[in-house]
Image: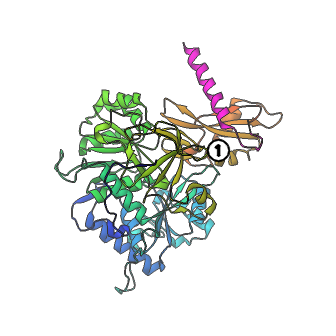
Amino acid sequence: MPSKSLYPDLPIPDVDLVSFVPGDKLIVIYFDPYTKRSYTYAQVRDTAITFGKGLKSLWEWQKGDVLALYTPNCIDTPAITWGCHWAGGILSPANPNYTVEELAFQLKDSGAKALVTQLPYIKNAQEAAKQVGIPLDRVIVMGDQKDPSYKVKHFTSIVNTAGTSRWRRTKATNPSEDLAFLVYSSGTTGHPKGVMLTHRNIVSNTMMIKAAEAGKLQPTGGPTGEGDKLLAFLPFFHIYGLTCLIHQSLYSGLQLVVMPKFDLEDFCKFIQELKITFAYVVPPIVLLLSKHPLVSNYDLSSIRMMNSGAAPLTRELVDAVHDRLKIPVKQGYGLSETSPTTHTQPWEDWNKTIGSVGKLLPYQTAKYMSAEEKEMAVGEVGELWIKGPNVFKGYLNNPEGTAHAKTADGYFKTGDVGYQDKDGNFFITDRVKELIKYKGFQVPPAELEGILVSHPKINDVAVIGVYSKDDASELPRAYIVPKDGLGKTDEDAKEIIDWLSAKVAHHKRLRGGVRWVDEIPKSVSGKILRRMLKVKAQEEEDAKTKAKL
């Protein structure tokens, strides 16, 4: 029988995100520790409305128009997001490490009408816009840097110039169907897939996260009297940062201290100086906190809890951080298709069920299924299926993919394998899908294979993820059959690695290296047998370990 959440289900308001998030308070909610720039609730709301009116006035923004975002974390992101929603639009955030070709694919697939970036990224943004036919006057910048030539507009100049107050908010009349976000999740078929998330998806998941924290995170009190403070460095273009950081902080009244990207020394410095009390992290950061000597230079005692997601966390890492810093680390689980969070450990269970991703959040129903789609009993291993108001609407322009991922009765097939225990704790042990998870980013092997096979020295290729203890992450590795007559040299391997690095985003590089093979193991139907390559990789690792003894 499917498992239901042990949390009570609270009513979900039937509203869009503009109505859902508060906007009338004068306290600071978003803070940039580098520039000291900040937004209060009221400033976010006012800036969003001004931008939304500008979209309508200057660009005749219509309901369902897509605004793309190509930027690192920035405190302007929330105002731009809700300004787009105010005008009836859909936001589609893209990884700022994308190459021109990767960005152009997302712009074209999403049907983006305009693009917001930051000045250091303007060249790639403009080139991608050209490729898909977005006018260059609709490529604008955000952040503290403005174009000194004034050729590129800053988002604050996108205002109502019509001298009229006739522009009114375009509401999401059906929050369960109207899209708020198009986030792109890598798939095993090569190109990323556009995950359609509705206003109700994000509203419900934001409420679920707050309920699961069970009042532990508070907007008042704490070491500074300003309540809990969250340090935000996980990317806002990823659903983890989009919901857990941007939306949850505003809804729960928690100040968000925004870093453009992770830097260990700044991370430690800001915790010490600003008395940060909570942080969402990923396993590689937990690893740094457990080992890096720099950490000892700072007082991190204000941290009350960390929540790790995006990839499994081992007991060794959890214990190492607590032994060194007395900081507890709990775990959670989610996916782009579930907006994202579906499970988290209660605070009091952080060291009782290490290895578990926790319990089902409110509104969730889940079951583990066999390959034959028969429900598994408690303790038996199967594929996790989840149902709830946070489950995505479908994949954009991909009805076949949607039909494969979602059942007729609303369950999403996660592609992750695991089990649950008798106490309702869920465990993830493996993945049905072939995605490589590099430090929380998804790397599709088929995409890399499609590029690599075009190299003049490669006859055939397969890519898998190999786990690195040093990185606490999987690393992409290519197994290559070279063209006839070519040597299998280190120089050739380096050339291929460098060649691919110039064509893909930072997280997709072959950090696991290259291995030369005589053939790629495949099934009769031609499918790559990746598990055989994983066995080969493990044998190599075991041989290294044995040689050291």
Q: Classify 393 as above or below 367.
A: below
Q: Which quadrant of the figure has residue 519?
A: top right
Number of numbered discs overlaid on the protein picture = 1
- Position of residue 125 relative to residue 215, above or below, is below
User: Quick check: can you spot residue 308?
Assistant: yes
Q: In the current view of this chain or complex, which residue is farthest to the right?
A: 485
Tell me where residue 111 sits by quadrant.
Answer: bottom right
- Give the residue type at disc 1: Leu
Give the residue displayed 72% in from the left and 29% down from the top: 489
- 530 relative position to 233: left or right: right
**Residue at 60%, 27% in the rendered image:** 538
Q: Where is mark 1, residue-wise?
A: 500
Q: Residues within 10 Å of mark 1 (few under 14, many from 20)?
A: some
Quarter of the image containing the C terminus?
top right
Q: Position of residue 404 (x, y in %)?
A: 60, 56
Question: Hey, which residue is sitting farthest top in the picture?
Answer: 549
In percent of width and height, residue 492 lies at: 71, 34
**Residue 194 among those drawn in magenta:** no
Q: Main secondary structure of the magenta part?
A: helix
Please give left or right for residue 395 compared with residue 91 in the image: right
Bounds of the magenta span?
521-549
Q: Residue furthest front?
A: 1
Model colouring:
rainbow
Vertical relation: 106 (above or below) 475? below
- Residue 296 visible somewhere in the drawing: no
Q: Is residue 529 magenta?
A: yes
Which element is circle 1 on?
helix
Q: Percent position (x, y) of residue 2?
A: 45, 49
Q: Nearer the viewer, residue 292 or 290?
A: 290
Q: Position of residue 22 (x, y in %)?
A: 28, 65
